[in-house]
Image (cartoon, rainbow, N blue to C red):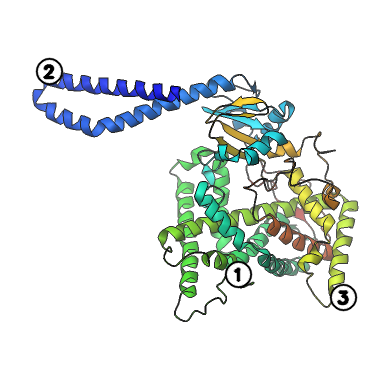
Amino acid sequence: MMSSFMSAFFADRVSKRVLFGAVAAAAMHHRESVVVVLFLILVLEPMVDRVLVKGTRDVAGWCRRWFYLNKLNRAPGFNWLVGHTLPLSKAVGAYPCTWDLFAFWSVPKAPKPVRVQIFTRHCVVIADPEPIRRVFNSNIKNYGKDTEFAYNPFLDILGTGLVTSEGESWKRQRGRISQALRMEILDDVVDIATRAVDRLCVKLEKIRGTGREIELAEEFRLLTLQVIGEAILSLSPEESDEVMPNLYLPIMEECNRRSLEPWRAYLPNKEYFSHKNKVKKLNAYVIKLIRQRWKLKHSVTATPNVDDSIDNPHADILDRVLADVPKSEYGPEVERQMCDEIKTFLLAGHETSAAMLIWTMWELVKAPEKMKIATEEAKKVYKNSEKKNRKTPSRDELNGLEYIVGALKESLRLYSVVPVVTRKCLGDDYLGGEFVPKGTTVIISVQGVHHREDLWENAQTFEPKRFVGNETDETGNYSYLPFIQGPRNCLGQYLALLEARVVMANLLRKFKFPSSRETNGAKHTKMIPIAPADGIWFTVD
């Protein structure tokens, strides 16, 4: 408080002295311009005061963070001019990549945080369950979403949706979406995912035994987009395949590039204007769907509580969310907010699922004994369902796919498809026993936690049994974080795991996937969620 008061007092004194000097000079040399100068002072003084006060406070805050964080362990490669920007820049597109560096720097010093400076931004990196618990749970109000830095490149997709919102807006959205994701929608997801994987199986059947290659990572991206598109908006697979690859996926690719090449957001070149145009078209497309659904819901011929109600077990997610909006509140602002929420669903609902599927398939293909266990489990569960004259197992029966679910969870641990999460420290705090001043960016190295040998035996080995029979406490110890933990955990995690087990079980019981390229398995260094560098190619038997 004292430092803020002194900063404001100093700025106020300086600004008034400068302006007084300007008036005096004008009076001495150009008396006729005194009135003009006085008018400008009255207009400009409040603005100058605000700029100087804010600037002075920012500088004072930066110096304070530097003073306290300078006492922490500092990551290697520091340069007094640009901090750790050079080693992080060199890691873009290389191995080890940027996310690897955060893990390498933070794990040896855990539970203590490690100081990292990116240009002028003061950061600490943590990779230990206890300080992570404090950030995600016990002191969550002190850690805000970092929309200025980490999330900024993705705001064209996320907007003010659930991932980036705070306070009452977050509570309102969280409550609305939680209600929309009630158990009934999960039953629909089983059928939606089954239809989607059946369409993929038709494509795979055409090349079975021919020796022709197929790149499954891209197939999984399209499949998961079809699933989430139908679950949210009741899109047909044809419409999903037409819209998403042409609008949504190129936007995501550019957002990923901007996260590690931030200058791309300011270069007025062809890619810049193409990206801007695609964002505009995607927003218009989604808002049009919202508008059409709202008009249908409130048309004269609409039947109350049928097809458009949250009580209808087969309503899609948009129906369920719109059912919670009073007619008196609906308007352009609600449409814009819902557009952001739907785009957030698309991002969270398909990227992680697609990455989870491809890495699980790749690891099972590399380990024939594990593949055999997973395949036999899938055949057993589906055979039991067929005995009951049902093509698709119920949601309860799908719980019998324990080993496959363990494989899916293990791939999320081993590959850490979201390798870092960032938060902004809103007030002074202690993490890992070290003082962290207000304004510090806290980088949680999810990959670092997931790869710690003292937390995970043989951490670099793919072992699905870690998650079979509840052997690992994945909800309370903050060492397993693919869906984060605490009050802001991912609402769609059950939907994602349910969809993925349906897809994986159907593929494993019907086909074999020999690896067809030596380059398979390399991780992309510029994409989040972490995807294969050059796809993963298989033949089909």
- Is 525 positioned to the left or the right of 264 in the image? right
| Disc 1 to disc 3: CB gap under 8 Å | no
Q: Nearer the viewer, residue 341 or 206?
A: 341
Q: Residue at x 60, y 34 (%)?
A: 442
Q: Nearer the viewer, residue 522 or 47?
A: 47
Q: Residue at x 49, y 38 (%)?
A: 263
Label 1, label 2: how far apart the Cα atoms are = 77 Å
Quadrant of image for the C terminus: bottom right
Mark 3 and mark 2 lie on one chain; the one further toward the N terminus is 2
Q: Residue furthest left?
A: 32
Which amino acid lies under the numbered mark 1 shown in the image of this protein? Glu
Label 1, label 3: how far apart the Cα atoms are = 33 Å
- Please determine whether, in this image, residue 393 is positioned above or below residue 101: below
Q: Nearer the viewer, residue 286 or 310?
A: 310
Q: Secondary structure at mark 1?
A: helix
Residue at mark 1:
238
Residue at mark 3:
387
Badge number at residue 28: 2
Quadrant of image for the N terminus: top left
Question: Does residue 159 appear anywhere in the picture?
Answer: no
